[in-house]
């Protein structure tokens, strides 16, 4: 019976094959006898979806007429703003909704997707970008069969075309890592913020990472407050060599040990011992040392260096870097992506980029500036290493060649990135050093000096103190006596730790494993916007409100502000990203404990009263002294008699100098475009305004007022262009 069935099946298959062959033969014959010419193949229509119009404009250049490039304008779906948006009872399932205002855009994308033969999702190559692509798949109802995900580290023709050849599906591990972060942040942020609104004041917020950053700043402030300075002394002997060149020799100690001068008596003991004694050279050591170049930028190091040398906030740095990555209009070329992807913790570069930069160095700087072997830098232990370091897309695009096409700030940042990258593949700097030991009265004084023998990478990247302490070498020999000009004892006191700056806080967060490259700028922006911290020059310090919020978080939510706990949570997210952990696991472990702490805080935390800061400004309507309040758009002056008196006006921060025209206070103001300027408090009666901050000093040449320009160091420039006097600003005592 089995054989019969098998034979029948075989017969049926043979019949089908014969039928197919006959059909194929008929089609072939029809083609041969066709009188009309063969019709050309219909070209495929492709849709590429990116996040931003700038990126779309850049990519359009590289793809043919069969490709349409459209922008999603960032995320198209998110958790609702009006509610928690997490179904806690249903295993913490997020409830995504279409973002308000995106309906028309989604309709246009759906229409284009429906007519396309193939769709490429080309959002950024990170967790957030992967999640945006995933949300687009769902919101547009895209067919998986004709939809692919493409990523590229730089927006160049080669990179984009290569990404299309290597198209793939959505990486759900990356998506889930982003979902886990989003859900955790929402589970913490919404209920704790609601608690702060009830118990402290409205418009406050707390977050899983921002609260740790605030704690770090508050802890540093506490260290500064409780710091007790210790006295110590130093002694410098100013000596001359045979040629009359002067050098400073600093007290080291004795031949047995380094001296510790804790008070004046200790210093006087040394001075008595060396008084009238010869200063004799006992030892001269000559040697060479090298200084290796720095690795190319990661997101963190770019933000740090831009803060130190360009005075950019982390937020401003990332905004400019994003513009350079997505593409800038270059004269005669159109929109061009100038740097590689700007959210990275890796210091490696591709072989192609290495080939470009070494060729550039060889042809434009000199072959002697190339190292013997390729410079390879180690990526930090906890780095994800998903992308290359930040670098120019084309090394031959020098900063100067692009200057006319870039804004002033774009140019500064591009130059910083370009110089750092090119120098990273150059030879080390070589120094010749000289260490001189001088003996007098049983004490040893030392001169340490150095000179550059070969500049190496400093030829391109000389932004730090590489040339510090470089002087002429003393013309001396061992056992010769030096002429003592004077000996100077100096009293010092140990200093408290410095307040954090943007640069040092980002460095600390990175070292502690708090947050990731893409989160540093938003963290800083949030705690400043919420008035939890303020800045004076570059130093960040907590406000009264910031310290109140920090105390609440420490008392009622110790795990959230625990540095080790937060860093471990980042590691959990990294495990989800590589697929080694289920994405809801850390949420299930965290939330029950957090929920208990939240209930406890709601029950036990009493209402905190924060008094508004009173000013000298008198309300013209009722005569009360107005107070400083914080609204959605920052600080403003309001009458404390509200609601009886609802008078309010803008608040301008004093600049700390007097008006050169009328002697009133100069205030910091902002133009309609957001640019800072300085104006008199008596405006409109006094019309003094200046883009630059007026200085207290008068010009010693013509008597006009001077203004401050630049930083590190600040220059004082005469306001009268006919005079042109410039001098360096002297540091004011703390």
Image: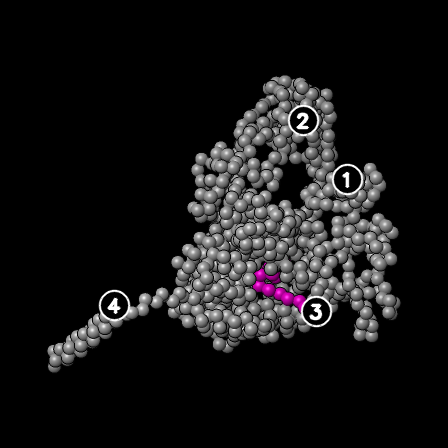
Disc 3: CA contacts within 10 A as few (<14), some (14-19) or many (>=20): some
Q: Is residue 571 left or right of residue 219?
A: left
Q: Which residue is mark 2?
A: 247
- Image quarter of the N terminus: bottom left
Q: Which residue is mark 3?
A: 201
- Labels 4 and 1 touching (C-beta < 8 A): no
Q: Is residue 30 left or right of residue 594?
A: left
Name the N-terminal-most of marks 4 and 3: 4
Dot in front, 4 or 1 = 4
Q: Is residue 339 magenta?
A: no
Q: Which residue is mark 1?
A: 724
Name the N-terminal-most of marks 4 and 2: 4
- The relative height of residue 713 versus residue 318 in the rendered view (above or below) is above
Identify the image quadrant of residue 263. Answer: top right
- The relative height of residue 647 versus residue 337 in the rendered view (above or below) is below
Q: Is residue 460 left or right of residue 16?
A: right
Image coords of residue 480 (percent x, y) = 63, 18
Disc 1: CA contacts within 10 A as few (<14), some (14-19) or many (>=20): few
Q: Dot 2: what SS?
A: strand
Write the residue at 56% across / 36% down: 459
- Labels 2 and 1 touching (C-beta < 8 A): no
Which span of residues is magenta-colored?
199-215
Tell which of 500 and 343 is nearer to you. Answer: 343
Q: Which residue is mark 4?
A: 32
Name the N-terminal-most of marks 2 and 3: 3
- Labels 1 and 3 touching (C-beta < 8 A): no
Tell which of 663 and 244 is nearer to you. Answer: 663
């Amino acid at each position: 019976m089995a054989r019969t069935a098998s034979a029948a099946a075989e017969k049926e298959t043979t019949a089908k094959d014969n039928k197919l062959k006959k059909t194929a033969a008929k089609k072939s014959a029809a083609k041969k006898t066709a009188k009309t010419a063969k019709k050309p193949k219909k070209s495929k229509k492709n849709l590429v979806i990116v996040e931003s119009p700038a990126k779309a404009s850049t990519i359009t250049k590289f793809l043919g007429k069969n490709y349409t490039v459209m922008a999603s304008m960032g995320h198209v779906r998110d958790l609702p703003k009006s509610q928690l948006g997490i179904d806690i009872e249903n295993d913490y399932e997020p409830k995504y909704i279409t973002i308000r205002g995106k309906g028309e855009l989604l309709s246009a994308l759906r229409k284009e997707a429906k007519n396309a033969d193939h769709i490429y999702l080309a959002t950024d190559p990170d967790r957030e970008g992967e999640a945006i692509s995933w949300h687009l798949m769902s919101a547009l109802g895209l067919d998986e069969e004709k939809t692919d995900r493409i990523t590229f580290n730089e927006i160049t023709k080669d990179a984009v075309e290569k990404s299309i050849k290597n198209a793939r599906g959505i990486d759900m591990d990356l998506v889930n890592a982003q979902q886990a972060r989003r859900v955790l942040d929402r589970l913490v942020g919404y209920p704790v913020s609601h608690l702060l609104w009830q118990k402290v004041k409205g418009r406050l917020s707390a977050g899983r990472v921002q609260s740790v950053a605030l704690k770090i700043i508050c802890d540093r402030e506490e260290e500064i407050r409780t710091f007790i300075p210790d006295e110590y002394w130093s002694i410098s002997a100013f000596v001359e060599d045979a040629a009359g060149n002067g050098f400073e020799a600093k007290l080291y100690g004795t031949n047995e040990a380094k001296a510790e001068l804790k008070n004046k008596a200790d210093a006087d003991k040394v001075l008595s011992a060396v008084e009238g004694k010869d200063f004799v050279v006992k030892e001269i050591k000559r040697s060479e040392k090298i200084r290796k170049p720095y690795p190319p930028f990661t997101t963190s190091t770019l933000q740090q260096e831009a803060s130190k040398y360009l005075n950019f906030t982390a937020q401003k740095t990332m905004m400019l870097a994003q513009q350079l990555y997505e593409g800038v209009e270059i004269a005669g070329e159109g929109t061009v992506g100038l740097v590689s992807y700007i959210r990275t913790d890796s210091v490696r570069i591709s072989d192609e980029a290495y080939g470009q930069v070494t060729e550039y160095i060889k042809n434009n700087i000199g072959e002697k500036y190339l190292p013997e072997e390729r410079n390879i830098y180690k990526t930090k232990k906890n780095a994800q290493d998903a992308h290359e370091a930040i670098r120019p897309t084309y090394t031959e695009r020098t900063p100067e060649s692009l200057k006319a096409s870039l804004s002033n700030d774009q140019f500064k940042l591009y130059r910083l990135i370009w110089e750092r990258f090119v120098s990273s593949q150059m030879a080390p700097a070589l120094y010749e050093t000289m260490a001189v030991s001088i003996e007098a009265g049983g004490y040893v004084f030392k001169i340490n000096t150095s000179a550059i023998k070969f500049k190496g990478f400093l030829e391109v990247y000389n932004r730090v103190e590489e040339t510090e302490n470089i002087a002429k070498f003393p013309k001396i020999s061992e056992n010769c006596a030096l002429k003592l000009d004077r000996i100077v004892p100096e009293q010092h006191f140990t200093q408290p730790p410095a307040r954090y700056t943007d640069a040092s806080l980002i460095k600390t967060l990175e070292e502690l494993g708090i947050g990731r490259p893409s989160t540093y700028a938003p963290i800083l922006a949030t705690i400043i916007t919420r008035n939890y911290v303020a800045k004076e020059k570059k130093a960040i310090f907590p406000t009264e409100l910031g310290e109140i919020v920090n105390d609440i978080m420490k008392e009622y939510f110790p795990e959230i502000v625990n540095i080790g706990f937060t860093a471990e949570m980042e590691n959990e997210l990294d495990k989800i990203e590589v697929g080694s952990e289920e994405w809801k696991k850390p949420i299930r472990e965290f939330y029950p404990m957090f929920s208990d702490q939240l209930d406890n805080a709601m029950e036990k935390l009493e209402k905190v009263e924060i008094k508004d800061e009173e000013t000298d400004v008198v309300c013209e309507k009722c005569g009360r002294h107005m107070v400083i309040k914080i609204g959605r758009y920052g600080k403003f002056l309001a009458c404390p008699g509200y609601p009886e008196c609802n008078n309010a006006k803008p608040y301008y921060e004093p600049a700390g100098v007097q008006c050169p025209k009328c002697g009133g206070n100069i205030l910091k103001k902002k133009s309609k475009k957001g640019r800072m300027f300085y104006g008199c408090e008596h405006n409109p009666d006094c019309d003094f305004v200046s883009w630059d901050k007026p200085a207290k000093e008068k010009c010693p040449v013509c008597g006009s007022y001077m203004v401050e320009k630049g930083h590190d160091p600040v220059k004082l420039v005469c306001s009268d262009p006919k005079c042109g006097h410039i001098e360096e600003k002297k540091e004011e005592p703390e």
